[in-house]
Amino acid sequence: MIKAVRGTRDILPPDSALFELVEERAREVFHLYNFQEIRTPIFEDTQLFSRSVGEETDIVGKEMFTWEDKARAQSEKAQSLTLRPENTAGVVRAYIEHKLGDKGQLQKLYYIGPQFRRERPQKGRYRQFYQIGAEVIGPPSAGSESPARDAEVIEMLAALLDRVGIKGSTLQLNSVGCANDRAKYNEALRAALKPVVGQMCVDCQRRAETNPLRVLDCKVPEDQPIIAKLPKISDYLDEPCREHFAEVKKILDAVGVKYEVNERMVRGLDYYTRTTFEFTHGGLGAQSALLGGGRYDGLSEALGGPKAPGIGFALGLDRFVIALQSETQSAQTPSVKAFIAPLGDGMNAAAAKLARELRAQGVALDLGDESFRLKKSFEAAERAGAQFVIIVGENEVKADAFAVKDIKSGEQRTVARAELVQALKANP
Ligand code: AMP
């Protein structure tokens, strides 16, 4: 038997209704904040990720699904392609490619879709998972660097969590500074690591040389006491970065969004600058991050584009659903208004005609089959959550009026075709 591949899964009803619910609420919130949708390809040139997410990150170093696409002509080189492990790089590539910054306006873009990482599968961690994310990006003249944008994005997320109905999450906030601060901090980390790195895992030994910041992502338990004693980024922020962070916090205080400052949270992607944040939730177990994001002021330039500071986030849709389930919320299973029961041989066509008319007028219906006895149609109607059964037999078709039975009360009446929609809608 062929099964779904390790780390992938089928999302079946009724769970799929929770996915749908979160997606719908997210779209509503995005529209309230003037975001518009962008859809980028599921695979991209591998370099897009190595140049943005960073060579030394777990994502690029260990987790990407990459393959060589055969050259089409002899003169062409094979191209290395990768299933997107995240979507910010794709959005920024699209921003550069389509010159979205040329009109001088801020771009507010959101996306919903699958991402792929070769991680060890466990609860809340999959190799194909779903993210909903958004980016605010534009030329500095459009205000893209303003701490007001950071605070607005974070406040929007608090609103989204409320609207979806997830309670009990915690917001962790940090600033990882700008490129200058990072260079000084990396030097300080290098120096602090020198005497102790010999006792650390091989990944940390390499990272201490190549990209010391990434040592902070290490998950090896034995390394944690060493990591806890390393210098803190907050001591290396320059004055503008300090002020920027203070202003983000001031606005969050003013709008009443609660946060904890976590100076160890550097997030596992190289492109972040200044504000970084994560919302965590107790119902998720080991994979406690519901969503994460941050500012990426140098990303566009690193990808060969114009100066275009930005801030964004991605939330794990799979984890939102787990959090909702842990709070024992279930989405209402969608149900239909009525079930059309063709009764007797040759009635399928007339039933299909009636169903088409009613659906076109916005009535959600399910449709049976002429081979069903009435009892079987009633059972199917109940399973579909229908309020009424509409019987389409030979007499009904002749009279152009149909027997409509209310499943709960058992009451039955005859309704002319022209009055059907009104009769069904009159009963909420
Ligand atoms: P990141 O792109 O790593 O910042 O992740 C953003 C969010 O995506 C995380 O907070 C998770 O909620 C979710 N996420 C990341 N990796 C996975 C995964 N392998 N499986 C499920 N959700 C994930």
Image: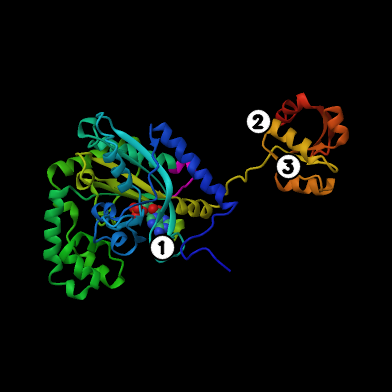
Residue at (46% x, 35% y) in the render: 28
What number is the disc on residue 286? 1
Vertical arrangement, residue 413 with respect to residue 177, above or below? above
What number is the disc on residue 261? none
Residue at (49% x, 64% y) in the render: 5
What number is the disc on residue 360? 2
Foreground mark, 2 or 1, reads 2
Q: Amino acid at mark 2?
A: Ala
Q: Amino acid at mark 3?
A: Leu
Q: Amino acid at mark 1?
A: Ala
Name the foreground residue: 347 vs 332.
Answer: 347
Per the image, label 3 sits on a secondary structure element best described as: strand
In the rendered image, the quadrant that contains the N terminus is bottom right
Q: Position of residue 375 (x, y in %)?
A: 83, 48
Per the image, label 2 sits on a secondary structure element best described as: helix
Residue that badge 3 annotates:
367
* Separation of residues labelled 3 and 2 (CA atoms): 14 Å
Is ligand 1 within 8 Å of the beta carbon of the residue shown at mark 2?
no
Tell me which colouring the rendered structure shows.
rainbow
* Disc on the earlier residue, 3 or 2: 2
Q: Position of residue 205 (x, y in %)?
A: 19, 70
Name the foreground residue: 357 vs 335.
Answer: 357
Residue 35: image quadrant is top left
* Separation of residues labelled 2 and 1 (CA atoms): 48 Å
Residue 341: image quadrant is top right
Segment colored magenta: 161-168
